């Protein structure tokens, strides 16, 4: 409640983490569309300050003081809806959020965010789907040694690939052209590229990482640690 300005009982069993406000805007738009559809099963939308609306046209007031991690809950019976947490940027926030939310035993969580492409074949706006993680975030090193592999779940990978195919209306090579799969590196130093070549730059090259962010590996590792898919 302290970090998200929403009560624990509002949290749903499917949790999304993000690091930019425009994902929150898209989520609210999706939520309002769902609330307008009586067949969707969604019953209400909760925002920071525990404001709850059932009318898709109703305003969602912005608190005078926003919390560190603004959180929104699209609720459904038996907590089977979706929670979105804007954790902001950085592995420390990612660890803090997942440490707490793991206690609620969600069915699954995902990082839906913004990353840097590391390959010349990538273009702005392409999708990246992590099949493995390079942990340069350091915040979990004392809790989970970096030699422990963090396996992706095939069911989640397939679901995400199918979702991109559905949204983009592409398949085969055309789908592969806009969605890269491979290792995603998570780092705690935003200015890694200014370092000498003996540091993260060399490890990124050796790992064949295709993308870089500051949260994904932390969330995946804490999910592995706490047995949250």
Image: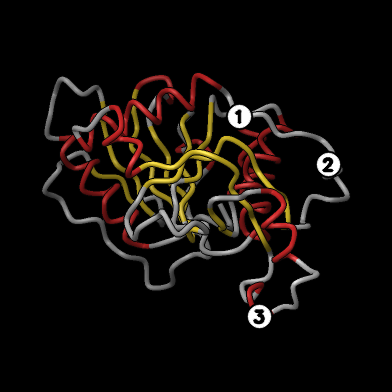
Residue 147 left/right relative to 63: right
Q: Secondary structure at mark 3?
A: helix
Q: Residue at x 62, y 59 (%)?
A: 93
Q: Which label number is shown at residue 194?
A: 3
Which label sits in the foreground, 2 or 3?
3
Residue for point 21% across, 39% down? 54
Tell me residue 84's x, y (percent): 42, 45
The crowding category of the residue bearing disc 1, from other C-alpha atoms within 10 Å (few below 14, some 14 to 19, many at least 20), is some
Q: Considering only order in the chain, which callout, 3 or 2, is on the residue closer to the N terminus?
A: 2
Q: Secondary structure at mark 1?
A: loop
Q: Quadrant of residue 202?
A: bottom right
Earlier along the polypeptide chain: callout 1 or callout 3? 1
Query: Viewer-proximal residue, 13 or 161?
Result: 161
How many marks are shown on the rendered structure?
3
Locate residue 94, reporting x and y percent.
62, 53
Query: Where is residue 156 shown, x and y percent of the image?
Result: 49, 25
For the residues labelled 1 and 2, the Cα–Cα distance comes to 16 Å
Q: Nearer the viewer, residue 17 or 168?
A: 168
Q: Which residue is mark 2?
A: 144
Specify few, some or many for label 3: CA neighbours under 10 Å numbering under 14, 14-19, or 20 or more. few
What residue lies at 23% left-to-right and 35% top-to-bottom?
167
Residue depicted at x 24% and y 44%? 53
Left/right of residue 28 with respect to residue 215 in the rendered view: left
Q: Residues within 10 Å of mark 2 (few under 14, many from 20)?
A: some
Q: Which quadrant would the C terminus be assigned to in this image?
A: top right
Disc 1 designates what residue? 152
- Measure how far apart labels 1 and 3 are at the Cα level: 31 Å
84 horizontally vs 138: left or right: left
Residues at marks 2 and 3, CA–CA distance in whole angstroms: 28 Å
């Amino acid at each position: 409640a302290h970090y998200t300005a929403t009560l624990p009982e509002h949290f749903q069993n499917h949790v999304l983490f993000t690091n930019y406000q425009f994902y929150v805007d898209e989520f609210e738009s999706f939520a309002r569309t769902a609330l307008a559809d009586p067949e969707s099963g969604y019953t209400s939308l909760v925002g920071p300050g525990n404001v709850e609306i059932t009318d898709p046209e109703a305003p969602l007031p912005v608190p005078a003081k926003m919390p560190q991690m603004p959180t929104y809950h699209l609720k459904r019976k038996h907590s089977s809806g979706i929670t979105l947490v804007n954790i902001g940027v950085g592995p420390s926030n990612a660890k803090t959020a997942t440490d707490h939310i793991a206690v609620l035993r969600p069915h699954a969580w995902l990082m839906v965010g913004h990353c840097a492409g590391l390959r010349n074949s990538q273009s702005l706006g392409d999708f990246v789907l992590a099949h493995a993680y390079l942990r340069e975030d350091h915040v979990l090193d004392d809790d989970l040694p970096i030699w422990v592999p963090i396996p992706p779940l095939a069911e989640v990978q397939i679901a995400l690939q199918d979702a991109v195919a559905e949204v983009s209306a592409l398949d085969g090579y055309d789908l592969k052209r806009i969605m890269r799969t491979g290792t995603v590196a998570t780092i705690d130093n935003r200015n890694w590229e200014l370092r000498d070549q003996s540091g993260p730059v060399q490890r990124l090259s050796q790992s064949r990482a295709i993308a870089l962010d500051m949260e994904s590996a932390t969330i995946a590792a804490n999910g592995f640690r706490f047995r949250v898919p």
